[in-house]
Image (spheres, helix red, strand yellow):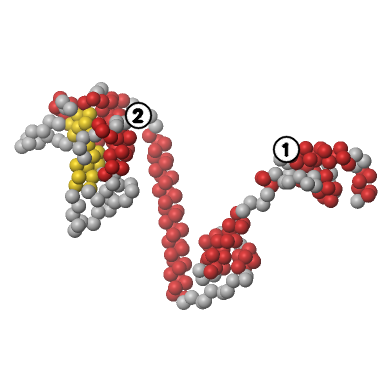
Amino acid sequence: MTAEMNRYADFEGLRQQAVTLRREGLSLRQIRDRLKIFNNDLLQRLVKGEPPPEWTKRPRAKDDLRARARELRLQGMTYDQIQVELGCSKSSISLWVRDLPKPERRDPAEQARLASRKRWEHELAVRDERRRATKADAARSVGAMSERELLLAGVALYWAEGTKDKPYDRRENVIFVNSDPGVIQLYLAWLRLLNVEPERLAYRVMIHMTADVEAAELYWADLVGVPVSALQKTTIKKHNPKTVRKNVGEDYRGCLVIRVARGAELYRRIEGWWSGMVEAQRLTA
């Protein structure tokens, strides 16, 4: 150590530089390279008493993996199963769980079922990722919508989901019902394109009696940008105990009904646009 110290006569000067760099957040390796000090013992003495920066501390990732490996081992998993679950080496698993009792040997049929389940879970994950990627790619391909595109999209949307006039039941009203918030937003954008004044719109919630009616009213009012007090009286649908409904849970908010006041003229235009679209595709087919 004495010979090494002789190479650095100004120890206190070096220490001051090393401490400054340490407090700036440099690691020992970075300080070593910056000051050209390649003696580890000397380097440690130069920064003695200075805590290492947070980013150099050993991450907790392995600690978390170790805890999870022990948990899985206690559940009866083999090294192979833990390796598949966590993606770490068998040698690490062995080191982490060697003090735990070995799991009882499972029936080969049970092991085969577990392996099959793991393969199926992996396949489902792969499918979900493909599904997500396809949707994202399709969404990006749409780009900005022109006014004509929005007009035609809105007409098709209304004709699929809106009320329609019948020869045996004259009802030239513009009433739209849907439970999808995206559909509602597109429909409202379409009405704005048609210069339908906001004061001509009336909103009403339709929902099953077993749902959270108040939460649904708050949700729809916020979506369309009106106070809850502006909503018409909510329509409560009675629940048929013989029917097994799947639209339940926190995400179920019923449907929103949107009515355009004095809408007869608009309805006739919608029906005309739709007829024109049908005729146009027939001529180009």
Compared with residue 47, is residue 163 higher up or lower down, i.e. above or below? above
Residue at the (42%, 51%) spot, across then down: 128
**Mark found first going from the N terminus, 1 or 2:** 1
Q: Is residue 232 visible?
A: yes
x and y, in percent, of residue 36 in the image:
83, 41
Residue 1 on image: x %, y % = 91, 51
Report whether 270 appears left or right of 48: left
Query: As rendered, which of 260 and 172 lies closer to the eye?
Result: 260
Residue 266 circle label: none
Q: Is residue 122 left or right of residue 214?
A: right
Judge the density around disc 1: few (<14), some (14-19), many (≥20) Cα neighbours within 10 Å. few
Q: Could you tell me which residue is drawn at 25 percent across and 31 percent down? A: 230
Give the amino acid type for the residue marked by disc 2 in the picture. Met
Residue 105 lies left or right of residue 216; in this view the side is right
Q: Quadrant of residue 243?
A: bottom left
Residue under pointer 1: 24
CA–CA distance in space, label 1 to label 2: 51 Å
Residue 69 is situated, as x and y percent measured from the top left of the image, at 56, 63
Residue drawn at 26 percent across, 44 percent down: 213
Asked where in the image residue 71 lies, by quadrant, the reply is bottom right
For the residue pair 116 and 224, the one nearer the viewer reads as: 224
Q: Return the residue at label 2.
A: 145
